[in-house]
Image (tube, grey):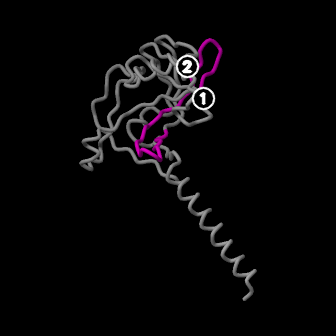
């Protein structure tokens, strides 16, 4: 075998190894997602039109909280657990307030997705829908649900709890099981 062929094989193995390493790093670090439309409590809401019981605010996020290009806006209300964070992001210009929807505005839910951050491993469920107000259509995501870390570390399957959303009359106090998002 000639030196040229040996060098070619070595170069091919090195390039293949680097390509495989890049793929592994990408698969590890990339935010993963999976549909949770058929999981409680989301299956109760997806496909339905609800009426907001309180004022909700629509934001455009420069850092993309919901990772879904079809739904470019973020819907939040003052009772959302991340409201303080939102106020801080708005103050520094990372969030832009688009409009406010008064109580009585309708919202039609279309799907729900569980996102899992590839770096931290934390998951966040988001329900997506469309609001039509004053002749304009807004497609937005509402990040809804938090994992109870104590239950999760104890391997309790039903470890997800959901704060009172602006379309609910009262908070649901039950715990639910949701899947961890996967890459494929």
Circle 1 residue: 72
Q: Foreground: 33 or 20?
A: 20
* Disc 2 versus disc 1: nearer the observer: 2
Q: Quadrant of residue 138?
A: top right
Left or right: where does residue 173 sit relative to residue 114? Answer: left
Q: Secondary structure at mark 2?
A: loop
Residue plotted at (48% across, 51% down): 182
Residue plotted at (47% across, 34% down): 126
Residue 34 screen position, x and y as percent:
49, 46
Circle 2 residue: 93
The disc label shown at residue 112, or none: none
**Which image quarter holds the N terminus?**
bottom right
- Position above or below: 127 against 86: below
Assess whether residue 147 is covered by the magenta stretch.
no
| Crowd around label 1: few <14 · some 14–19 · many ≥20 (10 Å) | some
Spot the residue most to the front. 3
Q: Which residues are magenta?
A: 113-139
**What type of secondary structure mainly makes up the magenta span?**
strand
The answer to the question of whether label 2 and label 1 lie on touching residues, with beta carbons closer than 8 A, is: no
- Position above or below: 29 against 131: below
């Amino acid at each position: 075998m000639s030196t040229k062929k040996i060098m070619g094989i070595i170069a091919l193995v090195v390039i293949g190894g680097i390509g495989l390493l890049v793929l592994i790093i990408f698969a590890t670090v990339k935010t993963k997602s999976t549909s949770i439309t058929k999981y409680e409590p989301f299956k109760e809401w997806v496909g339905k039109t609800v009426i907001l019981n309180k004022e909700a605010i629509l934001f455009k996020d420069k850092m993309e909280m919901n990772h879904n290009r079809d739904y470019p806006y973020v819907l939040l209300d003052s009772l959302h657990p991340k409201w303080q964070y939102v106020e801080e992001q708005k103050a520094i210009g990372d969030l832009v307030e688009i409009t406010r929807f008064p109580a009585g505005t309708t919202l039609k839910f279309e799907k729900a997705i569980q996102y899992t951050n590839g770096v931290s491993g934390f998951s966040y469920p988001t329900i997506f829908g469309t609001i039509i107000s004053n002749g304009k259509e807004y497609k937005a995501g509402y990040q809804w649900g938090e994992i109870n870390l104590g239950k999760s570390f104890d391997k309790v399957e039903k470890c997800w709890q959901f704060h009172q959303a602006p379309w609910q009359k009262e908070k649901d106090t039950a715990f639910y099981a949701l899947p961890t998002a996967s890459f494929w």
